[in-house]
Amino acid sequence: MDHIPSHLEVRCAQLSQAGRKEINEDAIGIRIPEGSLLSSKGIVCVIADGVSTSEAGREASEACVKNLLYDYYCTPDTWTVEKSVSTVLHALNRWLFAQGTQFNQTDKGYICTLSILILKHDLAHIFHVGDSRIYRLREEKLVQLTTDHSRKVNNTSYLARAMGLDSKVQIDYRKEALHQDDLFILSTDGIHDFSDSRDWVTIIKDEQDLNKICINLQETALKNGSEDNLSCQIIKVDCIDETNDKSFFDSLSELPFPPLLKKDQVLDGLKVCSSLHESSRSQLYLVEDVETGKKFVIKTPSPNFSDDPAYIDRFITESWLGKRFRHNKLVQVTKGRIPPTCLYYLMEYVKGVTLEEWMKKNTPCSPEQALRIIKQIALGLRYLHRQQVIHQDLKPGNILIDSNEQIKLIDYGSCYVHASQELPARQWTPEQALGTATYSAPECALGKRVEYASDQFSLAVILYELLSGTLPYRNQLENLTQEKQLQHLEYRELASKKVFVPIWFDQAIKKALSPLPDKRFGDIDEFIYQLEHGHENFSMNERLPLIDTNPIRFWQGVALIQALILAILIAHLLK
């Protein structure tokens, strides 16, 4: 994240040579970015060993290194390191396998081993497939961080896993805490199979020049009879992002808070037209660029929180997220013509009202109209989830709808970003903005782990309200404080409220509104599919059983029947 600086500093050296072979089928690479990329993506070291028994081992190793070093930095900033690297590697593996099997040339395999070390803030992320290796030296103790994927048959070693070996690849992943002065070694089997790693400690201890360490490791392997390619990388961590880094807060305080704005006031070339919304946490104003006449919405932080780092952190994160979202169902955060002189951010101006206001005049809706609206919201949520972001505060007040019933999601202030968990610990406790209880899933109210299914629950609440004008659990969600209360949550079927909807609507909404996340649909798309295609399993004229639509009337009927039976029995006995 751009507003979280990284002070990670490393020194590195790498060396790769053919050794006693004619061709060097190894490939190595290191990328140390600066600025925002160092913070959001970190430092990447990668080593690959082309399998000599495959005809295109060299091409495979070079493709893996070059593409990984480029493609990883092109993945969304909101993705975790694991998600980013896994996505790139699986795509690379499919390409290698396809290259090796095209034209039925099964003997021309594009196969290689691959080991990746990514240093980001205060963590080391390790990805591995094959028999190249990653070691870590800490306080003169050398530890191998990877496990060889090889098998021995008649004293001959065969790779059990490698890039390009099959259409699917299983990649080992682990992460470790970084310590200052950690030293990492990446090597191919031409080096570590022909030297005792215990001797490496002595080699490293007696030599400060990292380039000379690489040379010494290669020379040792050659002396011990290595006839393979020789490649290694050395990375020394000189500085990591400390947990209590004062600059963490300083970076948040670079811009001062703006004052409360008034009509016709001009700020950075933007003239205030009107106030759209004010609360204890923020203000929204409609503004117009004095030169271009283009209108925007400006969001400013509340002066009440000018010394609250957790609040400022979340406000800046909200702006950071909005600038990265590119979807027509999400309000776009944009840049002004003049760089900001204080803390605020600009959004596109959307003519319309909130769904909350719209619903006051237009509910209950027909199933067709409600589904048109819900499908648009689902498109926005699907995009967020693919970015590894959970909205967490989905409600009618955070949805804009225009005269053509086109919607846009707004307010990213409560979004949960998976990549934020890879940041160093704050000096403060990050704000846990859990959204609005009326629309939030039970796990949010109970302070449990937030899941993508939490947004699905909120979407189902909105759909229920669109169809009925009421809420499915009345005020029970607002009063949730203990897990045992979940068993008392009673879903009220739409049919019981005399709302005419297809039976599959009621059943789909009920499932999406399950108090337990694992009882809901697998994802948003599955929920929408059931709403659209439920007729394949149900008739339009089917109705829910009386025990579901009106349990009170059902049990009253049962009691009446029992009373009649009892009266008949008593009368029979009295004869």
Image (cartoon, rainbow, N blue to C red):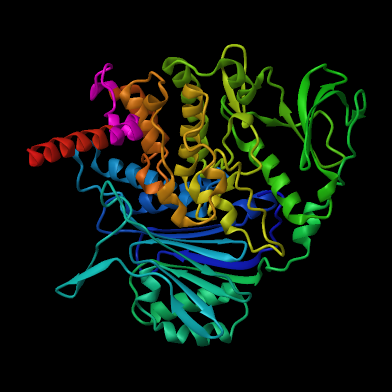
Image location (x, y in percent) of residue 434: 60, 47
Residue nearest the observer in this picture, 432 or 269: 432
The percent coordinates of residue 178 (x first, y second) are 58, 70
Direction from residue 382 to residue 228 in the image, left or right:
left
Residue at left 30%, top 41%? 99
536 magenta-colored: yes
Query: Residue 227: image x %, image y %?
Result: 33, 71
Q: Is residue 398 left or right of residue 163?
A: right
Residue at x 76%, y 24% (from the top left corner): 296
Q: Between residues 8 and 68, which one lies in front from this camera angle?
A: 8
The magenta segment: 535-556
Judge whether 36 appears above or below 215 on screen: above
In this view, the residue farthest toward the top is 404
Viewed as shown, does residue 134 lie left or right of 432?
left
Quick check: 292 left or right of 361? right
**Percent of width and height locating residue 540:** 28, 17
Asked whether the viewer can see residue 261, the reply is: yes
With respect to residue 224, does 385 lie above or below? above
